[in-house]
Image: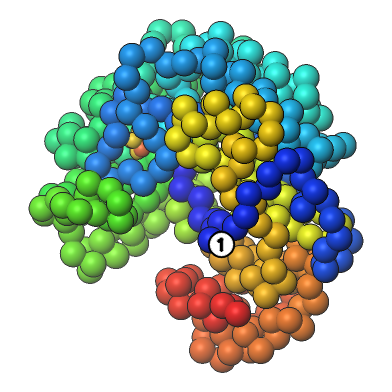
Amino acid sequence: MTRIFNIVPEGSESLGKAGAKVLGSGVLQLSSLPPLSLYVHVPWCVRKCPYCDFNSHEMSGDLPEQDYLAALRADLEQALPLIWGRQVVSIFIGGGTPSLLSPQTLDEMLALFRAYLNVWPDAEVTLEANPGTLEAGRFKAYAQSGVNRISLGIQSFQDAKLKALGRIHTADHARAAILSAQQAVSRVNLDLMFALPGQSLAECEADIREAMSFGTEHLSLYNLTLEPNTVFGKFPPSGLPDDDLAATMQDVVAEWAAAGGWERYEVSAYAQAGARCRHNLNYWEFGDYLGIGPGAHSKLSFHDRIIRQARAKQPQSWISKALQHDGSHIAESRELAPADLPFEFMLNALRLRQGVPAALFSERTGLSLTAITPALERATKKGLLDPDPTRLKASALGWRFLNDLHTEFLG
Ligand code: SF4
């Protein structure tokens, strides 16, 4: 699935009944509210991949689709007071493996969102799909229900690499899924990974060349990382490229994509002209999102405060708690302190190659730009930030060493 870098701070408290804590008076002054997106988490996968640190759970038997839908409805109903009257600009159904859901369930889910929410007529509606779960006609049925963008977890076109990653699909499944997705919708993203166990530079090039040959509008190209609390984190696979080779692969991948017409507009995201992922752009521009489903995160702004929430992670626990209608499915809810906002904003905005207009900082955080003037000056002096005062944008050096740049904005 698409990796989005956002943080939910610890030390949070349960929202408990209703949203009294959320709806009290805060200390910020936001002149306008940002665009609002909806994220829906589908937590099940056929098998857990050894590198995966997402909230995904191996399914046993049939999916509890009706219980899931009922809980999703209950989750959404309880969230409505937090987003009354606001328009939803994009919907992202991620996971896990949303393509495990039957077309009927997906249709009911999207009908539910249209009934409860003010969904923008042109809203981008993305569904993540695993090539290993493809059934004939499924993507077309999803499209008929309103999905207009499909994001495919391809990872590699080499069977040995897919096997090493523990994926359930083969290279031929991947090729067939891409063609099938392209027949169903015009907007297709391919997720590809590099720096894989035993991967040579030539194999990495072959993967990116084949991905580009399908002419999809969007590519997401990730360096395999070993995350704590994963099988690979505990037992690293042998034959991983060293840091130098992984960095060379990153450069080669970026060069190939640029030569083919895909602009690298974010650290891992490449798009043809006009084809950027609107949903993810809203995250990176510090927009708002309501996340429903197990473990989903939300960031919601009000005129005087910004909050973050996280839902209960275990699917069955989230289902039973959401159905109680007492707010207990919210595992964490926290108002962001003004001191946290500069880092949170920059953590997202500086991932964009062109950064963001400087004025967006005040618009989205309610803070004056002077709150980060010393950090901006420091980062510019170190050559990590572009000196243009009208934009908040990493320099070429800062983009390469993004963690160092982000650190400048820690409170
Ligand atoms: S298919 Fe995706 S979400 Fe599921 S376990 Fe593998 S990487 Fe994680």
Q: Quadrant of the N terminus?
A: top left
Q: Position of residue 356 (x, y in %)?
A: 68, 64
Quarter of the picture for ligand 1?
top left
Tell me: 234 left or right of 400: left
Q: In this view, does 208 lie above or below 370?
A: above
Q: Is residue 97 left or right of residue 66?
A: left
Residue 328 placement, left or right of 216 = right
Residue 157 visible within the image: no
Which image quadrant is residue 362 in? bottom right
Q: Which residue is drawn at 53% across and 40% down?
A: 312
Mark 1 residue CB less than 8 A from any atom of ligand 1: no
In the picture, measured across the screen, residue 28 lies left or right of residue 397, that is right
Provide residue 239's location: percent of width, then percent of height: 11, 54
- Residue 197 against residue 357 in the figure, above or below: above
Q: In this view, does 76 lie above or below 296?
A: above
Residue at 58%, 31% (x, y): give it. Answer: 321
**Kind of element beneath mark 1:** loop
- The local crowd at label 1, few if under 14, some if 14 to 19, many if 20 or more residues have their Cα within 10 Å, is few
Nearest the eye: 250 or 281: 281
Q: Quadrant of residue 173?
A: top left
Q: Is residue 20 visible?
A: yes
Residue denoted by label 1? 11
Residue occupying image coordinates x 78% and y 19%:
115
